[in-house]
Image (cartoon, rainbow, N blue to C red):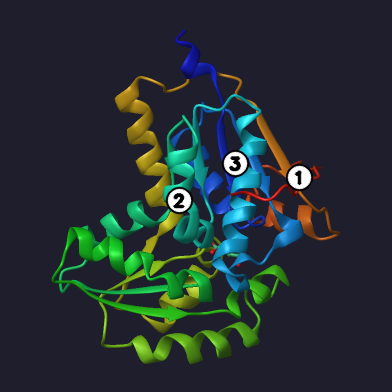
Amino acid sequence: MDTQQKKPIGIFDSGVGGLTVVRAMMELLPSESFVYLGDTANLPYGEKSAEMVRQYAFHNARFLQEFDIKVMVVACNTASSVALTDLQQAFDFPVIGVIEPAAKEAIKVSSSKKIGVIGTKRTIRTQMYTHKIHEIEPQATVVGKACPLFVPLIEEGFLHHEAMTLIAREYLVPLRGKIDTLILGCTHYPLIRDTIQSLLPEVHLVDSAYSTARELRQLLLERGWLSPSLTPSRLFYATDITEHLNTLARMILPEMPFLTFEEVRLASTPVV
Ligand code: DGL
């Protein structure tokens, strides 16, 4: 076996939301081993400054590098928005973010090229989705909408609560008639996909988790790095383990009912 094939994939997010990417990976790439890191001590990234998120992203990447990974996936939209290029330049393994795969897919499925993007405040402020979409399709119209209350409501387990419907209506109704495709530009949003779809029934939803898993599969295929393993290993680390962390994680990944996180403290040396 090629040595690269055997190596795990590193994947990080600000919390457990990135498990939506893991879920897609397990479906499309069931033989791959991976190491997941949720930087729960510093969640939410979406409310932090770009420089702070960049620092966190480097600490996470250095931790994953220790596992001799073949590829790193930045599952967090906020970290992908502010730090992807710097990470790609700093490490010698390929680094995939969630922005480009979702942007490409949105352009492919949108017939009017009127595309909406929802995400955290930081993700929307960077306009990375808009830049990526325009790089590929300059004529596209992109409408960005920050939805900062979705993450805390989901973290609180309020997925089907009436508060969620109320907030979702406030954020999404103004998008009606303006777009035909909407990118779920945050790890947590696939978990409220049904609520979003019910408010925008005509709109095609693009899940950045699945687009990213497909892009990862393509990269592994092209390089001949797909793992043939029948017993892949899956490791889950978090920088702070709170009471409901494992519950939330198992809710996202019901196929792993015994999923437990191990706590890890990351060095806080500043990144230059
Ligand atoms: N993981 C973040 C993202 O995808 C959402 C949670 C946070 O703000 O840290 O943007």
Locate residue 70, reporting x and y percent: 50, 27
Cα–Cα gap, marks 3 and 2: 11 Å
Please tell me how crowded label 3 is: few (under 14), some (14-19), or many (20+) other residues with Cα within 10 Å: many
Q: Residue at x 81, y 60 (%)?
A: 244
In the picture shown, does residue 195 fall above or below 93?
A: below
Q: What residue does disc 3 label?
A: 61
Locate residue 192, reporting x and y percent: 54, 70
Decide which of 45, 208 is in the foreground and name it.
45
In the picture shown, does residue 218 fall above or below 2?
A: below
Q: Earlier in the sequence, mark 3 or mark 1?
A: 3
Q: Residue at x 52, y 51 (%)?
A: 75
Badge 3 marks a residue whose secondary structure is helix
Q: Residue at x 51, y 48 (%)?
A: 74
In the picture shown, does residue 136 fall above or below 225?
A: below
The residue type indicated by label 3 comes to Ala
Q: Earlier in the sequence, mark 3 or mark 2?
A: 3
Q: Earlier in the sequence, mark 1 or mark 2?
A: 2
Badge 1 marks a residue whose secondary structure is loop
